[in-house]
Image (tube, rainbow, N blue to C red):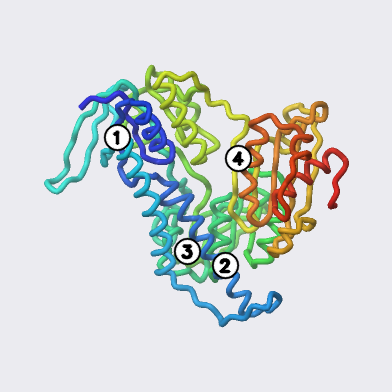
């Protein structure tokens, strides 16, 4: 079988590349070993947000059962894990079926099976069929690598038994009584907070001295306060040594060397993800690597001619929307367009309670880059829409060059501030100045007013704080 473009991996990078390539008239074959949509749609972004929503609604209903501040009275709620999983799985099926329909509509051929690279022009695909395993060989002009990533494990605490990854955490048969989360990054905190709201006793262990250690302290501070209010135990500067001999507690060592055990019915290891680079013949290509990642240029070309790579396998940030943008670009380059992957900024969102959004440079990032910048905050406590939603904690922050007022960064922490990410990214991508945002009329009452007010405050004429 011959094709012009062969894509390995049907996640948010691979399937977008396939759809765009097919739209451009490029003969395209997409090989996927598990489910279309990849980790994001099936065991990551989408199911995690569904679980977070369920947990938030359950927590809110519990509060209404004991707090009449809004005049709402309900009986004490109960949680049906099986029904919640059916609802979550229904959303996943709807989206993955939609991906399959789009690929079919645009005549991108999908082969369900496991790809193994023979060389830069040839891939062998193994698939289970009714008559047993079948193998077919596909030759291509262009090979696009989009294998994604998998949860990283701890050598002292491999997955299995009570020790689970985010994949298993997204499909609980029941809520554990005591959950220990190893890692206070975005995955660990998103799921840890969700489980706490569903009734679990949650303890988080982090080797560094801050929750969300990849973010600046000012953004992490409101989240740390929220963890305390929710009753989530947090141990910072501590390392995990493994499970105890009985297998029912996590052994932990603090910065002073003292050891203790934390009882656990389940342990979620959430120390990050690693690129999927093993088990499918990638080493046969002998590509230039950047540590554990495939090295690519600004067009996602690898060191081998007509072999491309996108998404998590190419490095940080390991985000679905980055992979999608790269996949679209590669398809257009193969189709004859002149494109480069050089976004001004890529938004990142943490769906904790409160949420955290970052786009572009923080004040510290700007200083490290040698930029002379100004920055200003607008507190959500002064935003009418936030207060009417009982969500006055948090702020919006803007960072801009002192000389030209060119905006180089936005950050926000608060309830549902994820919806501000598009406005943040667009302003940076379009080269907006503080005056552009401050002079744009924002609808009242909305969270968006906080964006305008932050820009106004940085210019020295805030009106509502």
Q: CA distance from mark 1 to mark 2?
A: 44 Å
Mark 1 or 2, which is nearer the eye? Answer: 1
Label whose residue precedes the other's in the sequence (2 or 3):
2
Is 299 above or below relative to 155?
Answer: above
Residue 107, numbered label: 1
Label whose residue precedes the other's in the sequence (3 or 4):
3
| Quadrant position of residue 409 | top right
| Quadrant position of residue 189 | bottom right
Q: CA distance from mark 2 to mark 3?
A: 16 Å
Q: Do labels 3 and 4 touch, CB within 8 Å?
A: no
Residue 391 in the image, given as x and y percentages of width and height:
70, 61
Q: CA distance from mark 3 to mark 4?
A: 32 Å
Label whose residue precedes the other's in the sequence (2 or 4):
2
For label 4, the SS is loop
Residue 266, numbered label: 3
Which class describes the residues within 10 Å of circle 3: few (<14), some (14-19), or many (20+)?
A: many
| Quadrant position of residue 371 | top right
Between residue 86 and residue 273, name the one nearer to us: 86
Q: Residue at x 20, y 45 (%)?
A: 128
Which class describes the residues within 10 Å of circle 2: few (<14), some (14-19), or many (20+)?
A: many
**To which residue does mark 2 refer?**
197
Q: Do labels 3 and 1 touch, CB within 8 Å?
A: no
Mark 2 or 3, which is nearer the eye? Answer: 2
Residue 247, numbered label: none
Residue 347, numbered label: 4
Is 159 above or below relative to 140?
Answer: below
């Amino acid at each position: 079988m011959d094709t012009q473009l062969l894509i390995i991996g049907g996640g948010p990078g691979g399937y977008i590349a396939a759809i765009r390539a097919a739209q451009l008239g490029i003969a395209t074959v997409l090989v996927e070993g598990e489910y279309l949509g990849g980790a994001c749609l099936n065991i990551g972004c989408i199911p995690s947000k569904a679980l977070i929503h369920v947990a938030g609604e359950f927590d809110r209903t519990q509060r209404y059962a004991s707090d009449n501040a809004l005049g709402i009275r309900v009986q004490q709620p109960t949680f049906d894990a099986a029904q919640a999983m059916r609802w979550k799985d229904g959303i996943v099926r709807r989206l993955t079926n939609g991906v399959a329909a789009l690929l079919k509509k645009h005549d991108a051929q999908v082969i369900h099976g496991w790809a193994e690279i023979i060389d830069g022009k040839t891939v062998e695909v193994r698939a289970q069929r009714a008559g047993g395993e079948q193998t077919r060989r596909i030759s291509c002009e262009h090979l696009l690598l989009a294998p994604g990533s998998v949860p990283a494990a701890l050598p002292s605490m491999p997955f299995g038994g009570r020790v689970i990854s985010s994949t298993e955490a997204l499909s609980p048969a029941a809520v554990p009584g005591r959950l220990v989360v190893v890692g206070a990054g975005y995955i660990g905190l998103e799921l840890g907070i969700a489980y706490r709201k569903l009734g679990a006793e949650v303890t988080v262990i982090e080797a560094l001295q801050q929750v969300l250690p990849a973010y600046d302290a000012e953004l992490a501070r409101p989240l740390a306060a929220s963890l305390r209010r929710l009753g989530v135990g947090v141990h910072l500067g501590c390392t995990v040594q493994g499970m105890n001999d009985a297998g029912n507690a996590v052994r932990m060592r603090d910065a002073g060397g003292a050891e203790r055990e934390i009882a656990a019915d389940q342990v979620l290891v959430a120390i990050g993800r690693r690129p999927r680079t093993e088990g499918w013949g990638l080493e046969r290509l002998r590509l230039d690597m950047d540590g554990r990642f495939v090295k690519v240029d600004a067009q996602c070309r690898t060191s081998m001619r007509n072999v491309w790579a996108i998404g998590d396998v190419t490095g940080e940030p390991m985000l679905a929307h980055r992979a999608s943008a790269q996949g679209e670009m590669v398809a257009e380059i193969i189709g004859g367009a002149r494109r480069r992957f050089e976004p001004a900024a890529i938004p990142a969102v943490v769906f904790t309670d409160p949420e955290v959004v970052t786009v572009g440079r923080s004040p510290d990032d700007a200083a490290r880059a040698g930029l002379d910048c100004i920055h200003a905050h607008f507190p959500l406590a002064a935003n009418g829409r936030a207060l009417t939603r009982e969500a006055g904690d948090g702020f919006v922050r803007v960072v801009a060059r002192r000389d030209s007022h060119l905006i180089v960064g936005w950050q926000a922490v608060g309830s549902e501030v994820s919806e501000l990410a598009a406005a943040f990214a667009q302003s940076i991508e379009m080269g907006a100045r503080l005056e552009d945002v401050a002079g744009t009329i924002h609808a009242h009452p909305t969270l968006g007013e906080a964006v305008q007010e932050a820009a106004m405050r940085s210019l020295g004429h805030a009106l509502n704080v």
